[in-house]
Image (cartoon, rainbow, N blue to C red):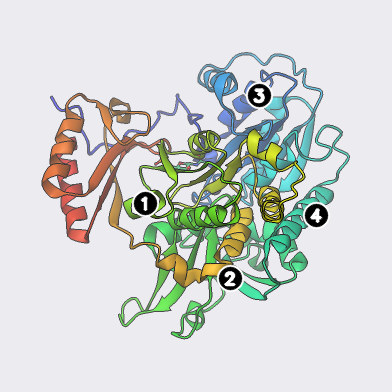
Amino acid sequence: MNPFSSKKQVVGSSASEGPIYNASGLRANATDLPRAVYNLGVALRSIPVSKSLGVMITASHNPWSDNGVKVSINGSIPSGSDEKKIKNLMLDPQPPPPNLHKHALTLGLDSRYSSLYLSRILSLGWGGKTRFIGLCSTPQMHLFSSPSYPNHKTFNLSVEDLRSHWTKNLTLAYESLLPSPKRSTLHVDCSNGVASDVIYPLTQSLNYLTLVLHNKREERGCDCETNLNEKCGSEYVQKNQNPPMLYGEDIYKFSSDKNNDIWCSVDGDVDRIVFYRIISTSSPLSPITIKLFDGDRLMCLVVKYLKRVTLNLSLNIGAVQTGYANGASTRYLKEELKVRVFCTRTGVKYLHEAASKFDVGVYFEANGHGSIVFSPYVLKLLTFDYKDEKLKAEVKTLKNVVKLCNEYVGCAVADMLLCLVAVDEIGWDGVESFYTDLKSSTTKFNVLNKNLVECNDDETKVVKPEGMQGELDGVMREIGGRCFVRKSNTEDCVRIYAEGEDDKVVAVLEERVRAVLG
Ligand code: 16G
Ligand code: ZN
């Protein structure tokens, strides 16, 4: 019998199981979270006391009514034995051991109304010292709780000091990277979340860049809580290829034919970014649309820039993507930019780990999570004093790129500034002409038990049920294009990805994959 035969029924994790902790943390409807959040606080007591811990209360790009927790251990997303420990203790909670940690747990939150309450519950479970840093982005929480951040152990920096150190650092790095001081403007859709609080100080400190913030949280008070990520933000813009809804503003005034403004959208915890132009169409029903520069394209932009500014250092630059990366971007990276491309399973943690295998590893998900990871070898190279003028200049540039990037998780603000530097020479039209996107669709397939699907390491091939991949291969041979199925880590479903030369191929491919699944 086909294991997917009862597919129409969606079965979530049952109430007794509770929300599951996975590679991207914890996420559920906020009302289902208190017990799990408490247990997570308790679980963190078991992490070795030598490590610096941080947590962020956020559900990222998800609706206002959800919430969740992201954890940082020494600045990074938990992995190895730490991750296992947390996972096991979340599945099988134990009586709280005494909290022996001398250093405080750094605790930040996004703007969701449930975040403050859940942060208190997490502190109760943790039962030790807490350094409350209030509203911040996830990448800021990772940075502020990392061993590399100034005074992370003594904590004698106030939250204001931390923020202004961060703002100054980004401003200095960005302005040193600009080839010549040139005034420019960028519109930022803050998704009605914490992004406006995080980015506002930069609007005051940047000398050449004017950031025009839209969908700011604070302007309209708490009655607009439910607007968080609602028809706006990076997830909405990227998945729907639509301009964001602008709350309290008329978007049409930004869409005249002559208007060449560049926009970007971030998400609810400011770790994703996509860029776009808003353009008018001749369709009376949807008179405006966007030209999207998604994570795949931004990756090509960043890799192209890095290759150019490190020509003489000749570093091993690698690109890390997931199966969802548009095939045209993969081809461009391999054939035009001539870098090695590595495909990994979905989730920032896996991309980040894979990127650290290169001298300079650039990773991006199509949805806008991305960063650059520099190897210890490269960081060492940057400490040498070079006589050669070209090398000297390249090292200076690379030092500022390192300073700009968040070394622990991708930061939408750092990526925003980096992309603006990288685009300076070629312009956004140049970025648009890199390649033409293949058409694609990502859809859900509801199953009784998503765990019946097992995939290979990079999640592009089904290993179980046996024989299924053979059938999918047959479909691809017949129809053309590319497809894969994988179980979602964040929802109770299997996801289908189909990609091809035109919409028809994609539609047929998707239909045939559905037939294979059940
Ligand atoms: C999470 C991941 C994101 C991934 C998405 C896929 C992090 C911080 N976030 O949001 O990278 O693209 O899950 O969701 O790792 P899926 O497994 O439901 O397709
Ligand atoms: Zn996010």
Task: Kindly identify which residue carries mark 3.
Answer: 44
Task: Kindly identify which residue carries mark 2.
Answer: 187
The C terminus - image quarter: top left
Task: Kindly identify which residue carries mark 1.
Answer: 335
Front-most of residues 80 and 245:
80
Q: Is residue 440 left or right of residue 277?
A: left
Location of residue 466 with respect to 513 vertically, above or below: above
Looking at the image, is mark 4 or mark 3 earlier in the sequence? 3
Looking at the image, is mark 2 or mark 1 earlier in the sequence? 2
Q: Is residue 126 left or right of residue 64?
A: right
Point out the frontmost of discs 2 and 1: 1
Residue 325 is tagged as: none
Tell me which residue sits at (80%, 48%) in the image. Answer: 162
Label pair 4/3, CB-CB below 8 angstroms: no
Query: Residue 108 placed where, x, y %?
Result: 69, 42
Looking at the image, is mark 4 or mark 2 earlier in the sequence? 4
* Residue 452 appears in the picture as rendered: yes
Q: Is residue 222 left or right of residue 5?
A: right
Instruction: Identify the amino acid type marked 3.
Output: Leu
Task: Kindly identify which residue carries mark 4.
Answer: 164
Instruction: Identify the amino acid type marked 1.
Output: Glu
Point out the frontmost of discs 4 and 1: 1
Location of residue 183 with respect to 319 vertically, above or below: below
Q: Is residue 63 left or right of residue 130?
A: left
Q: Secondary structure at mark 4?
A: helix
Q: Residues within 10 Å of mark 2 (few under 14, many from 20)?
A: some
